[in-house]
Image (cartoon, rainbow, N blue to C red):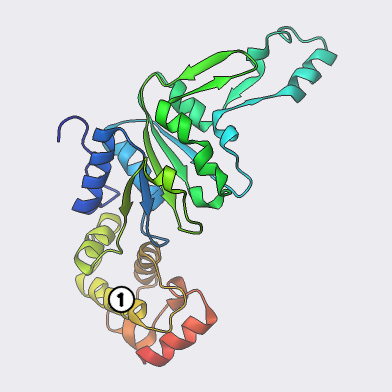
Amino acid sequence: MSGQQFNSTQDYVASEQLMAGVNVAIALQKPLLIKGEPGTGKTMLAEAVAKSLGKKLIIWNIKSTTKAQDGLYMYDTIQRLYDGQFGEEGVDDIAHYIKLGKLGEAFDADEQVVLLIDEIDKADLEFPNDLLWELDQMEFYIHETKRTVKAKHRPIVIITSNAEKELPDAFLRRCIFHYIDFPDEALMEEIVRTHYPDVEDKLLENAMEVFYGIRALRDIRKKPSTSELIDWINALQIGGISADEIRAKLPFVGVVVKKDEDLETVRQKLD
């Protein structure tokens, strides 16, 4: 595959399948839709892609109240009215009161950027469909100034979803999809060592054994994530915990287990 190629960075270890998914999306100039359980690095992927390719990252955090229009532009009528009352210069220039949203910024950038649309499933069901034209054509129209904002360089678009809502088929057809599988033990060790290269082998081995044992318990309601394992390793090192104490005492287990029922289950099953 020619052109720009994403590779793991010093801070982010990606599987071969994930790197291939990113590079296919870049080559085909399509948005990359990323799913995966919480803590598998969906949001951090966009940061890693931007760093790997040497590009600016623009983040559009989606909330339940977010509308597609928010990402394009906003006409600040309140500020214009305020300026008019106080006789500010330039009040007749409507363009002065047009503020581009995150999608607008990505289109208007002088160089190609990475645009992260984070947690798209938090918005209402119409939100993804409302973006179809803009993501297809890479342009939008500002009615107040009769100006078309067309992407100078097609941004690399990464979209994350926690699968809280089903996304429309029409939207899915326009995306490259990748599900980030939970890391196996070999990849997990590599991930942990990017953060703590000097971690003691036996401590890491025992901590991972307990961690994957917790994830394998059938009655666990919230399985611990990669980020929680990394935090736990850090806590064990700071606390001066020996490798042999990990299974026997489950020190700082609240770093990886966050629900009371799960804590009780873990203590019963791993004793």
The mark tally for this picture is 1
Instruction: Determine which residue is flagged by label 1.
Output: 212
Quadrant of the snapshot with the C terminus: bottom left
Residue 146 picture location, percent across and down: 59, 13
Of residues 29 and 81, the one nearer the viewer is 29
Q: As shown in the figure, which amino acid type bears the numbered disc 1? A: Tyr
State the SS at label 1.
helix
Front-most of residues 176 and 204: 176
Going 34% across and 47% down the picture, which residue do you hit? 45
Structural crowding at the residue carrying mark 1, measured as other residues with C-alpha within 10 Å and reported as few (<14), some (14–19) or many (≥20): some
Image point (31%, 64%), residue name: 182
Q: Which of 226 and 142 is in front in this view?
A: 142
Percent of width and height locating residue 82: 80, 20
Is 204 on the left-hand or right-hand side of 270? left
- Which residue of the protein is positioned furthest toward the right in this rendering? 85
The correct choice, above or below, for 88 with respect to 2 in the image is: above
In the picture, residue 6 is in which quadrant? top left
Residue at the extreme front of the image, as rendered: 170
Residue 217 against residue 258 in the figure, above or below: below
| Residue 75 relative to residue 53: left or right | right
Q: Is residue 8 visible?
A: no
Task: Answer yes or no: is residue 253 visible.
Answer: yes
Give coordinates of residue 196: x percent, y percent: 28, 59
The percent coordinates of residue 151 (x first, y second) are 42, 21
Find residue 144 and report its image quarter.
Answer: top right
- The structure residue drawn at horizontal position 40% and vertical position 80%, both measured from the top left corner, is 251
On the rendered image, what quadrant is the N terminus found in? top left
* Residue 52 drawn above or below residue 221: above
